[in-house]
Image (cartoon, helix red, strand yellow):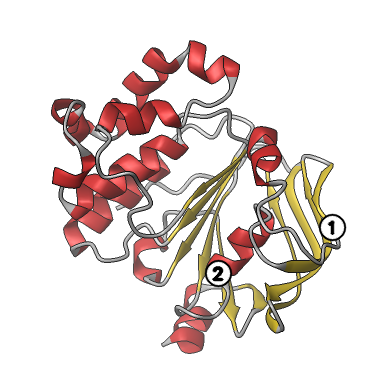
Amino acid sequence: GCLFRKWDSMSEVLSVSGVSAGYGSLRVLHDISLSINRGERVGLVGLNGHGKSTLFRTITGLVDWQNGSITLNGVQIGGKRTHGPGLKTHWIARQGVALMPQGDAMFIGLTVRQHLDAGAFTRLAWSERHDRRERILEIFPPLRKLLNQPVGKLSGGERRMVTLGRGLMGDVKLYLVDEPSLGLAPKISRAVVDALIKVDLADGAMVIAEQNLQLLEGCVDRLIGMHGGEIKGAADALSLHSEIG
């Protein structure tokens, strides 16, 4: 189980206002507005295909087009845009946004150590990569003995730990964790989510998109429902159960 912790400051890390976005002529997100506060962990819960991943991709500049406003610590990182998916993603990442995509987004020939170090892409993070890697190994102990293994030889749970660990290596203000339990056995899923809850957010924040509501109950500060490309607002477990169940 998770230890419930309240955030200690109400200043906004992320502000999404009136955002719509999509791919080609397809509109996936419909006028979304939400804010995430410093030190806060938020669960974004909904069925697959209802826009959770697209919201994360919109925040990181990876959709075809978008309207509205997205700010990170008061800095505009996403406004109206009609083309150029990915053109600003490197800049958005350097502002402190880490996207941990669902599935195994990795180069199977590289080792665990190489993948983790790839997450330390800023000058400061690279200079501290040894200490940061050690912190990742404390969060995900099974990786310690696997540092020199190519990730293609790892189990699904181990690969997920590498993907998450890589995202934790940077100078991050906003963690976007997409479906951490996808394809994993229940016991492994529980271990992965418990590890995420132990991450020291400092003055940052974390949003975990997850289809499995039970994994996040009692572990996050807030649960937000998402359905049909729209935010259903702050919701308690009962209303979310009826929405997605």
Total numbered labels placed on residues in the image: 2
Name the residue beneath numbered marker 1.
79
* Mark earlier in primary sequence (1, 2): 2
Which residue occupies 59% across, 46% down?
40
- Quarter of the C terminus within the rendering: bottom left
Q: Name the image quarter holding residue 230.
A: bottom right
| Residue placed most toward the observer, 235 or 72 | 72
- x and y, in percent, of residue 217 in the image: 41, 63
Tell me, for residue 188, which label it has, or none.
none
| Residue placed most toward the observer, 124 or 39 | 124
Which residue occupies 84% across, 57% down?
79
**Callout 2, which amino acid?**
Lys
Q: Residues within 10 Å of mark 2 (few under 14, many from 20)?
A: many
Which residue occupies 39% across, 14% down?
131
Between tags 1 and 2, which lies in front? 1
Name the residue beneath numbered marker 2.
52
Q: Residues within 10 Å of mark 1 (few under 14, many from 20)?
A: some
- Say if mark 1 contacts mark 2, CB within 8 Å: no
**Callout 1, which amino acid?**
Gly
- x and y, in percent, of residue 199 in the image: 43, 36
| Residue placed most toward the observer, 141 or 42 | 141
Q: Is residue 126 left or right of residue 114?
A: right
In this view, 170 is above or below 192: above
- x and y, in percent, of residue 47 in the image: 46, 80
In this view, 68 is above or below 11: below
Disc 2 element = helix
